[in-house]
Image: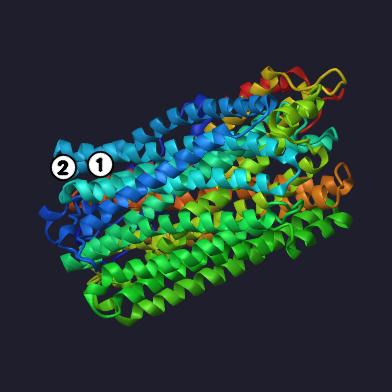
Amino acid sequence: MTRITHTPIWPPLTSLRSRHSAVCSVSPTPPRSRRTFLGALGALPFALLLCGFARPLPAVEDPSSNVHGGEANLVLPDLSQVTVIGGFSGQTLLIIGLIVCLLGLGFGLATYVQLKKMPVHASMLEVAELIYATCQAYLKKQGRFLLILWVFITAVIVIYYKVLVGFPWGKMLIVVAFSLLGMAGSYSVAWFGIRVNTFANARTAYASLRGKPLPIHKTPMKSGMSIGMVLISLELLMMLIILLFLPNDVAGACFIGFAIGESLGASALRIAGGIFTKIADIGADLMKIVFKIDEDDPRNPGVIADCTGDNAGDSVGPSADGFETYGVTGVALVTFIILAVNDPVLQATLLVWVFSVRVAMILASALAYAINARIVASRYSDATTMNFEAPLSSLVWFTSIICIAATYLMSWLVLAPQGGALWIELATIVTCGTLAGALIPELVKVFTSTKSRHVRETVKSSRQGGASLNILSGVVAGNFSAYWLGITIVGLMGGAFLISEVTLGDYMLAPAVFAFGLVAFGFLGMGPVTIAVDSYGPVTDNAQSVYELSRIEAIDGIDEEVQRSDGFAPQWDNAKLMLEENDGAGNTFKATAKPVLIGTAVVGATTMIFSIIIGLTNRLEEGLNYLSILHAPFLLGLIMGGAVIFWFSGASIQAVTTGAYRAVEFIKTSIKLDDDTERASEKDSTRVVEICTQYAQQGMLTIFLAVFFATLSFAFVEPYFFIGYLISIAIFGLYQAIYMANAGGAWDNAKKIVEVDLHAKGTALHDATIVGDTVGDPFKDTSSVALNPIIKFTTLFGLLAVELAVSLTGQGLSALVYTLAVIFALVSAFFVYRSFYHMRIQAPMEDPADGEDSPADSPASQIGAQR
């Protein structure tokens, strides 16, 4: 980042309008582009505000040194100079870490093979493979979309690093290549996740026929650990390869490119997956009210899309998100250490320590899983009933305790030779984050578990107040959860801050910022287990659907066939009941992973924002007064961030709303419920999948481009405005995501209580909880979860964007910078406009007079009208 000084003049809007009239004017638009014109017109007030901001950016003391590539030119220290207790060099220790990562990948792949070989009935396997086939088609389309979005990112990388910075072609291509590798990593773990989950769903469904709860728990748990170990091991393996085997002056560029790519992949897959899954889920849910049928009734053409969505939203999204979160947090810490620590030996020592602790935590997660699995097996081997949440809770706590012990041990090995109590301080700070990884799930359960008072209050309020009071009770649960989780995160970060005040200031700049980054690092310490309990949910959800869609009970001679092939008599009634109960546990633990990931994004973003600040302020020596609400651009940036968070929440839900409208409309007119129909036609099921895919891709592309151009615009406006904006989206995003996720979890499990505990399917109470759940679906699985990668992508890409703006200004191109800021703002506002007006429901408010769909209002015509 460039060293700059700042002029404290911020001219009023009126004095600058004439000077920047050329920049702020809007060209006449042809009538056929009326929507484009309206989008630009809606952006005009903000464009004028940009003109008011416009003043020369901070002057550069040495223009010749202005363009240097920022974080991509970081030179990593020589790791061979680090010696740990036992005489090992730092490089040797990390090479051992590479072997551990390979073992982690081997564990995941071995589990994959075991799942594939587990017994399953052909009827269930057929359904599972159909779900996987639709998931494949969806992911292939998403892959093509990702490549389009990658082109936008690559254009900025090439313009900055090649044209402005003057990187050699080789080094610039390394940045581009690693951005593609990072995106491919997010995409590949997402693909692996759906393959494992679609193996596990059929095996879980078949295992339920034994009438014992333990096999129903073990199968999704095994698949979840497979995904978690592969995801974390692959991410760490890639980063260790960069750290150990690439030249020190190239590794920084590789880290930045890699992080940008994986952040891009996670953002797109999270947004699209969240939209897809909730369109399908709402379509399937509402049929229970309209036709009084089961959610997984095979005659409903929306069921296959719902199963695909469970994987697209609840497996693909979290897998890509977890991969990106783990990587970006690591890159943030690497960047901080190089920028804030002066001593090269200490830099190298801290880098070895960070990655060694990560390796130790992989081993700790595997050990905790093995111990917990043995305890659960001995306790429930002959049980006929089981609290499915209990083994998941014990796994999280076992992992937390073992990870904390591993952190202290590895910190002593690597940092004790430095002398003093540095190893104790850093290990204790990381422990604050590791405790958060265990405490947050416990708090989330208070608001989302089927056993919690908040969820039961939601059910009770629905009995007399219907859907209205059901929704209000869910809102209460979400708001209360945001308070208590916020207090917990602040408390743990506050503890980390107090510890950092002891001696860390003797070693580095801004020790509190490093402490916050380590808290985020600790959040992710239990990475394999966090991903595992999150992946447990889509398997349990799909297992119910596979059971119903297979129609296994109706197969002639099925009891004798199962007895002959696998040696047990099917327990049909117990099977369905336990699958429902296990799904409730899956719902709860899907909810627990969301605040952990969003908390990591927010806490980790602090470290990334510091990388911008340290460059703007010449290593915190000047210009700090501009990080104040007395500096108007900084204050306005704080306000702007909240606006974007609330727009994003609305835009993502709008895509779900319109897509669900089209899906419901199509299902209602195509569903066949006569006695001769056993299941929906493949053609109708495929059409519902197409509707979901269409709106998921439209919504994702529109939202992402709005975020992309907003990031460029705000970074070009004024650096401290952008810093305020980044802080704001992190804070607003934290509470918005927690509120939406946990309100949605409360609504979801309130419905589960009615279905499982009260056996009240088809009643008015059930209808009320279904309505609440359809509100909660996009809350918890679309908007809230997508805020996490959006915050990280904006912060990470913002590093590049700010450097680009400052570099252009340093070359005397201020007018170009402000012109581009306005253009980018107009383009962003255009996509914001489209995110509602292009995605809105295109149908008349009045019903056709005869009560039937008119030709102009038919599903086909309405879907076509949206294209």
Q: Is residue 63 left or right of residue 130?
A: left
* Residue 336, image quadrant: bottom left
Residue 803 lies, in percent from the top left, at 26, 52
Q: Of residues 844 and 559, which is closer to you in this image?
A: 559
Q: Are marks 1 and 2 in contact (CB under 8 Å)?
A: yes
Q: Amino acid at mark 1?
A: Val
Tally of numbered discs: 2
Q: Of residues 92 and 503, which is closer to you in this image?
A: 92
Q: State the colouring used for the structure image.
A: rainbow
Say which mark, if any, is on residue 175.
1
Q: Kindly identify which residue carries mark 2.
A: 167
SS for callout 1: helix
Residue 358 lies, in percent from the top left, at 37, 58
SS for callout 2: loop
Which is closer to the viewer, label 1 or label 2?
1
Residue 32 lies, in percent from the top left, at 51, 24
Other-residue count near label 1 (Cα within 10 Å), few / some / many at <14 / 14–19 / ≥20 = many
Q: Is residue 146 above or below residue 805?
A: above
